[in-house]
Amino acid sequence: MPQLSKRVGTFTDSVIRRMTRISDAHEGSINLSQGFPDFNPPQVLLDALAEMAKGGPQHQYSVTFGSEDLRRCIAEKYALRFGRPIDPETEVVITCGSTEAMMAAMMTVCDPGDKVIVFSPFYENYGADAILSGADPIYVPLVPPSFQFDPKVLEDAFQQRPKAIVVCNPSNPCGKVFTREELSYILSLAETYDAFVITDEVYEHIVFAPNVHVPAASLPGGDRRVITCNSLSKTFSITGWRLGFLIAPAEVAENVKKVHDFLTVGAPAPLQEAVCAGFRLGQDYYDGLTETYTRKRDLFCKGLDAIGLKHTVPQGSYFILVDISDFLATEKFAGWTDLQFCEWMVGEVGVAAVPGSSFFREPVGHLIRLHFARSEESLQEALRRLSGLRAYLK
Ligand code: GLN
C-alpha cells in the first residue's frame, strides 16, 4: 500500500470519542466521558423538526454558508450580546458544529509554520486543528487551582508573534470562565502584537453564578479581531444535529466561507430550518438551562465530596476534573497511566471518564474528566458506583 500522509501520523484519534466507544461496548456503563446530554431538546425543536420532515425545499442544500433564516436569528441574538449590529450576509457562517468552525477559522488565518497560542489545559480538538492547518501551538498554562494565566507568560508568548490565540470560554475541561479583565488583557495583547482571537464559546449558557460570560467580541476592538466560534449543541441539547456557527469581521468571514464550502458544502439544511424555533424561546429558557445545570453541578460535586474524591468546581461548562493521585499511589495502580485507569473504571466501576492527559501540554497524569450533562437519576447512580472506588484506597 502507498504511504499515507505524514500529517495523519502526527495525531491520534480523539480520546474523548474513543472513551465513548469503550463505554458503549460495556453494557450498562454510564458514559460521563464525551460531554453530551441524555435528555431531550426543547419540545419546540422536536416539533419543528417533525414539521420539516413533511417535505419541502429544506431537504436540499441550503446556501453554503447557512440558511438565511438561521443566519438572521444568529445575527439578531448576537447583535444584542456583542452590542453592535451584525450583518447576517457578510459576518455569519453556519458550520457543522463548532468543531468545523474552529477548524475553518484556523485554516483561514494560518499558514504552515505560523504560531498559535493555546491555553493548557485545552479541548483536544485544538491540537489537531493546529496540525491540520500547519500551525505550531505555543502553550500557555492555566495554573490550577484557579486556572489563571500569568500575564507575563502570556505576553512572552505574544512576543513570538503568533497569528492567533485560541480562547475556550467557558473552558473545557477546567471550567474556567474568563473575566472581563482577563479578556480585555488578551485583546490588548492581540492588538499590540496584531493577532486574531479565536474563541470557542459553546458553553456560554452554562455558567454558574456569580460568574458571568463575557463574549470577547463585545469588548472594544472585538469587532476587528475576534473570530467567535459557537454551537447550538449545548444550548439546545442537540449535539447530534451538528450545528455550529462563526461570527467574524466580513473580510475574515468571506474567506472562512470558502474553506467551509470546500470542506462540507453546508450543515444539514432541514436541521438549520428547524433550529430557528429555538431562537424564539425567551430568557426563561436560558434561565432554566442555567438552573438545571447548576443543580446538576451541585449534586455531583456534593456527591464527589461525600465519597472523598478531590475535584475542581467549574465556574462554567459541565466538566469536572477529579484527582486520582491517591489511587495511583496504591500498590494496585502503581505505574498506571490515567488512560489505563479510565479503561479499568469503565469495566470495574461502570462509569466512563476521559484521561486528563488528553487536555494538558504539561505531563499531567493524575486527573480524569467527568461530565454531568446527565439526568439526576444517572448522576446519582454514577455517584453510587464511584463510591465503590473507596474500597481501593484501603
Ligand atoms: N465538547 C464535548 C467534550 O469535550 C464533546 C465534543 C465532541 O465530542 N465533539 O466532551
Image (cartoon, grey):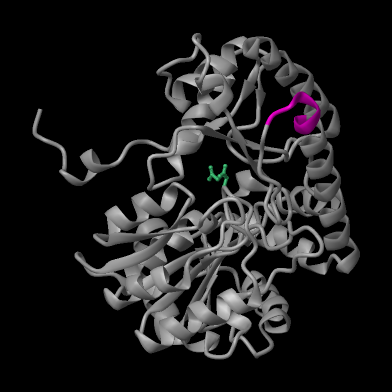
In the image, taking residue 170 as reference, residue 336 lies left or right, namely left
Q: Report the predominant secondary structure element of the magenta stretch.
A: helix
Is 308 magenta? The answer is yes
Task: Answer with the quadrant where ligand 1 appears in the image.
Answer: top right
Q: Residue at x 65, y 69 (%)?
A: 70
One can see residue 265 in this view:
no
In the image, residue 198 sits, relative to residue 128, either above or below, namely below
Quadrant of residue 170 in the image? Answer: bottom right
Quadrant of image for the N terminus: top left
One can see residue 23 in this view:
yes
| In-front residue for pair 378/189 | 189
Q: Residue most toward the right?
A: 284
Q: Residue at x 54, y 64 (%)?
A: 62
In magenta, the rendered stretch is 304-309
Quadrant of residue 88 in the image? Answer: bottom right
| In-front residue for pair 6/214 | 214
Q: Position of residue 220 (x, y in %)?
A: 58, 90
In the image, residue 361 sits, relative to residue 75, either above or below, namely above
